[in-house]
Amino acid sequence: MDAGAQQAPPRRRRLRRVLVGVLVALLLLLALDRLAAAGAERSLARRLQTTEGLSSRPEVHLRGFPFLTQVLAGRYGEVDLRAHDVERQGVRVSDVDVQLKGVQVSPGDAFSGRVREVPVRTGTGSVLLSYADLNGLVRQYGGALGSAVTVGPAGPGRLRADGPLGLSLTASVEVVEGRLLVTPDPAGLSALPPSVSSLVTSTLRAPLTVPDLPFGARLTGGTLDDSGASLTATADGAVLPTR
């Protein structure tokens, strides 16, 4: 019998064992990488809940693969953060959703757990103010008439304001310097007595100040829909406190 033929099965068995060993090692590395990412997400979520003063733990997703190479490099591809039912100075914000890029944490700080702040190069986000949230803003900033006015949907880009003395009109909303500015439609105002029209104008046109949002988000624009004010935000140059 050919000696090469006798040696072939042992060689195949050795090759099979090597391939199985490599596959097992890769699976272990993958599991370790995912466990490390999940642990980092939980740790960051706990810290942000405390430093941002959130009533519930935010959602944190560290994008990019593998995760451990990002830790060693001290640079992270993308970090997605989301907070629900944010309370700030008596104002409620239903959702804040931010995507951060260019996040940097030195490997030494990451491994030692001494991360005090996380600088961010760029960030974009979305903010949802439901009509319940908007009514809270109107009550807080609308003066004497604010507590008597109720706002609700009136089609794309519009809201309806209803109140005493037969008040019922539509208005638009825009973001100006990070605040919401409501502009009543002239046709609706002209149907009101002058004194009431003046009072309504001062109430609705009072800038609705949204308090500081978590994750360094700052309002830049947006529109109205059936769910409320769907706003855009930026987080460029933000620094997240984590201690």
Image (cartoon, rainbow, N blue to C red):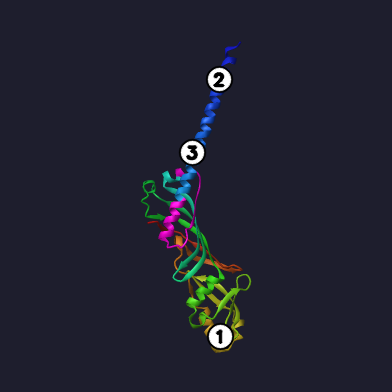
Label 3, secondary structure: give it.
helix
The amino acid on which the numbered mark 3 sits, given as a three-letter code, is Leu
Which of the pair 173/89 is nearer the observer? 89
In the image, residue 69 lies at what x, y percent? Answer: 45, 43
Quadrant hosting residue 224: bottom right
Please tell me which of labels 2 and 3 falls first in the chain: 2
Residue labelled with disc 1: 197
Seen in the picture, residue 211 relative to 117 is either above or below; the reply is below
In the image, which disc is placed on residue 10? 2
Give whichever of 183, 127 is nearer the camera.
Answer: 127
Mark 2 vs 3: CB contact within 8 A:
no
Q: Which residues are magenta?
A: 41-69
Q: How far, Cα to Cα, is label 2 from label 3?
A: 28 Å
Q: CA distance from mark 2 to mark 1?
A: 94 Å
Q: Earlier in the sequence, mark 3 or mark 1?
A: 3
Question: Is 42 covered by the magenta stretch?
Answer: yes
Identify residue type, mark 1. Answer: Ser
Q: How many marks?
A: 3
The residue singled out by tag 3 in the image is 29
The local secondary structure at tag 1 comes to helix
Q: Residues within 10 Å of mark 1 (few under 14, many from 20)?
A: some
User: In the image, residue 66 lies at what x, y percent?
Assistant: 49, 43
- Left or right position of 98 against 50: right
